[in-house]
Image: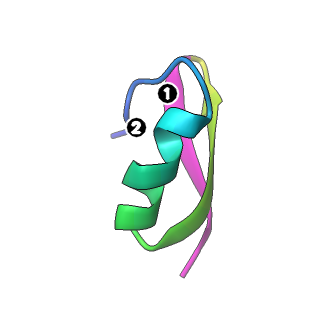
Amino acid sequence: TGTSCISPKQCTEPCRAKGCKHGKCMNRKCHCMLCL
């Protein structure tokens, strides 16, 4: 269910949309962290 990504910046918006403050890119997928 992760958004595909190349850089962590691409994960910021989709993660914020999920209520998360931070996202990083691993294995070309976004992993959201610091979620409510």
The mark total stands at 2
Q: Residues within 10 Å of mark 2 (few under 14, many from 20)?
A: some
Which image quarter holds the C terminus? Answer: bottom right
**Element type at mark 2:** loop
The reply to whether dot 2 and dot 1 touch (C-beta < 8 Å) is yes
Above or below 16: residue 4: above
Q: Which residue is mark 2?
A: 2
The earlier-in-sequence mark between 2 and 1 is 2
Which image quarter holds the N terminus? Answer: top left
Residue 33, image quadrant: bottom right
Above or below 1: residue 5: above
Q: Residues within 10 Å of mark 1 (few under 14, many from 20)?
A: some
- Magenta segment: 28-36
Q: What kind of residue is marked 1?
A: Lys
Q: How is the image coloured?
A: rainbow
Above or below 6: residue 32: below
Whether 15 is among the magenta residues is no
Q: Magenta span: helix, strand or loop, mainly?
A: strand
**What distance separates the C-alpha of mark 2 from that of mark 1?**
5 Å
Q: Residue 12 vs residue 24: left or right?
A: left
The residue lying at 44 percent from left, 73 percent from top is: 19
Q: Residue furthest bottom?
A: 36
The residue lying at 53 percent from left, 68 percent from top is: 20
Q: Position of residue 29 (x, y in %)?
A: 49, 27
Q: Residue 5 vs residue 31: left or right?
A: left
Whether 31 is among the magenta residues is yes
Q: Which residue is mark 1?
A: 29
**Element type at mark 1:** strand
